[in-house]
Image: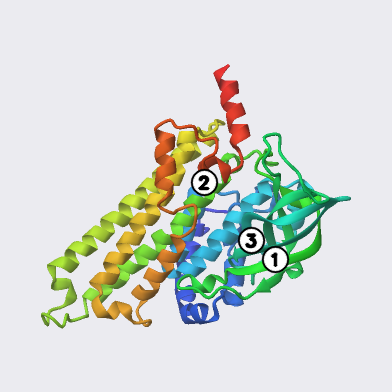
Amino acid sequence: MVTASTPSFIEIARALGPQIQSYSQEIEQGRRLPLPLVENMAQAGLFRLWIPQQLGGEEADPATFVRVVEEVSQADGAVGWCLMIGGAYGVFGGYLQDEAAHEIYGSDPHVITGGAFSPVGQAVVTEGGYRVTGRWQLGSGCQHTNWLVGGCRIFDGDQPRLNADGTPVRRMLFFPTEDCEIIDTWHTAGLRGTGSHDYAVSDVFVPATRSLSFREPPSHSGPLYALPTIALFGVAIAAVPLGIARHAIDVLVELAEVKTASRSLELLGQHAMVQADVARAEALLRSGRAFLYETLDEAWQVVTAGDTLSVKQRAMLWLASTQATVAATQAVELMFSAGGATSVYTSSPLERCLRDIRTAGQHICVVPSNFESVGQALLGFDMSTSVLLRFDDRSERLENDQLQRAK
């Protein structure tokens, strides 16, 4: 029960900051999150913010979860990323049929899900479900999850099942992590602690109820589940770079108070270029952050009023997520340069901030090429085959809603 004296989830996340930072070296060297830290985050309820209330989750508004991810990412980018994945995937509880939703999200208060959307698995229809074989990349947090999802193409025998438009039928299927082989592939420049290894299953049976498609309506009617899922994930992803950038600025400001620049024998903070760079970084971060939350708030107002986001409104979510990530990355690059030679040592947080934010920025939801797609939407182009709809798979429902309103 929440009372006036109950700390908010944002305050809880902030309070976990020192503990998260105490694990920093272990996270980086072990290439995964320490299980005691994961358990503490789970006990605090941070992974349950987007799980439906009917399943014991918080069903929190999007901005609350995004702010929690941002706060945790300020302490450690890899931890923020794993929270973003594990927490955002709670939204699937609003799409699954009741039986599977309760099995996955309602039976264990500390449940954590992860996995990949890419439909690289093969699910052959059998009595009661599917026989699934596949290998997926980028299974962030897979070593501490209870369940993993994998995107699959559906087969009838050896023939792929097709939609009415001729495209392959795709579904997301859920497997207990214990049924998966975790393959040690995550040797990377940044976000090393996310443990985003490959994972695989071989001829595993998955009940039909443990699958979903975004072409189908959500099983829960709350406004959280009315938002376009992939665009919603993009907003959550952008929270990680925002947190990393805030940490980088704070680190540089502290460094500027104690480091003497060898070229002038003055404190780093006395240099006009450093002063200007700190101001630019702050402006980049705050403007990108403000745009993100403003756009998310506008989208939330639309769905809470019972309306459907238009293509342009969905495009704005992608634009805000991408712009926030690009601006945060530029801010970190400014701080890394301002730190001089100190920044290049692995003992410097600025070195890790740069590696982590550039790795986060490679995600398809926040890459700069999204600017082109958004521009096309704003200019009125036909977006029926665009990434803005194709990766969401709600294009048919959106078009039908808009046709009904036009009648």
Mark pair 3, 2: CA separation: 17 Å
Whether residue 362 is situated above or below residue 126 in the rendered picture: below
Would residue 194 be visible to someone looking at this image? yes
Work out which residue is located at the far right of the displayed protein and give it: 127
Q: Answer above or below: position of 242 versus 385.
A: below
Q: Nearer the viewer, residue 11 or 96?
A: 96
Determine whether the residue tagged by mark 1 lies in a helix, strand or loop.
loop
Q: Which residue position is annotated with label 3? A: 115
Give the CA distance from mark 3 to mark 1: 11 Å
Above-or-below relation of 62 to 74: above
Q: How many other residues sit within 10 Å of disc 3, few (<14), some (14-19) or many (≥20)?
A: many
Taking the spot 55% from the left edge, 19% from the top edge, the residue there is 406
Residue 145, compared with residue 265, is above or below; it is above
Residue type of the residue flagged with mark 2: Ala
Number of the front mark, 1 or 2: 2
Q: Quadrant of the N terminus?
A: bottom right
Q: Which residue is mark 1?
A: 146
Which of the two labelled residues, at mark 3 and mark 1, occupies the earlier sequence position?
A: 3
For the question of whether residue 64 can be seen, the reply is: no
The residue to which callout 2 is attached is: 231
Residue 161 in the image: state x and y as whole percent.
Answer: 76, 44
Report the residue that reaches farthest toward the top. Answer: 407
Foreground pick, 29 / 225: 29
Give yes or no for contact between labels 3 and 2 (Cβ–Cβ under 8 Å): no
Q: Secondary structure at mark 2?
A: helix
